[in-house]
Every structure is written in C-alpha cells, then in structure tokens.
Amino acid sequence: MVRLNVYTFKIADIPTEPVYNVGEKSGIKIRKVIFSIGWLLTKMFFWRMKEKYVIRDFHPLIFFYAFGSFFGLSTIVLFLRVFYIWWAIGKIPSINALAAFFSFMSASLFTLFGMWFDMENNRNLK
C-alpha cells in the first residue's frame, strides 16, 4: 500500500469473509512479527517521504517531519537533563523545565502539521 501511495494509485476495501478450518491455529509468532513489521513500516515511511516528497515532487512537509524529529530527540535529551538535575540537586531550575516543554510542544506541533499536510496531499486518493 505504501508503494501504491507513492505511485498515486487508488485502492478500495473489498469486504471478504475469512474461511478457517475447524481447529486451525495460526503459525504467526507475535514477538517475532511485531518487530519485523514495525521495522518494515518505519523503513517504508522514510522511503515514501524520500521518494514521494523529495525526488518525485518536492513538498515542504519534509521540513515539518524533520523539525519534528529534531525537536523530539531534543525533548528526550532535555528531559533526561531535567531529571538528572532534579536527582542531583533536588530541585528543577525553571529555565530547564521551560526548554524541555518548549521542545516537546515544538516536536508535537511540527509532527502534527507534517501529518496534516501529508493527509491533505493524499486527499485525492480516496
């Protein structure tokens, strides 16, 4: 479906009834599949961003996702710093807390706007 999105193909849901034999068990191991599917979805997301919004037709939503990722990583670092300072001296300086929360809010907003632009760009595929 990710590749179809890049090539701007439309897809449709076709309702089907699954047929199972009596006593049939699935051979899927959830612990193995969850990581492989998660990795595949992450890899295909970055491939779609590169292929669709950089190579084929440039769209500024790439910057929103990039800034969202940057501020997301900054949020992790800043909150680790806040908790370390809290543990070390017993109180949190307000500037450190403000920086961490500003980074969190920026990461959230940039990512949400990137997702919004992505949905708007794919609206014609419904």
Image (cartoon, rainbow, N blue to C red):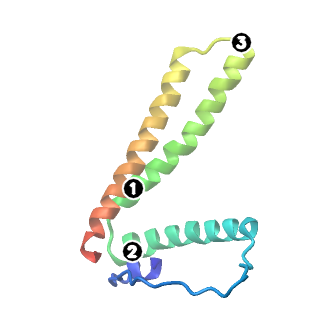
Q: Is residue 94 left or right of residue 38?
A: left
Q: Is residue 18 above or below residue 47?
A: below
Give the Cα separation between the discs numbered 3 and 2: 49 Å
Counting residues from the start of the chain, the first of labels 3 and 2 encountered is: 2
Instruction: Write the residue at 56% across / 69% down.
Output: 41
Instruction: Write the residue at 32% across / 65% down.
Output: 59
> What residue is shown with label 1?
63
> What residue is shown with label 2?
52
Residue 28: percent from left, percent from top: 72, 76
Which amino acid is tagged 2? Lys
Residue 125: percent from left, percent from top: 29, 76
Q: Residue lying at the far top in this picture: please name it.
A: 90
Task: Give the position of the C terminus as an image quadrant.
Answer: bottom left
Question: Where is residue 105, by image quadrant?
Answer: top left
Q: Is residue 124 left or right of residue 108?
A: left
Q: State the mark number for residue 89.
A: 3
Task: Give the position of the N terminus as an image quadrant.
Answer: bottom left
Q: Foreground residue, 90 or 96?
A: 90
Q: Is residue 120 above or below residue 11?
A: above
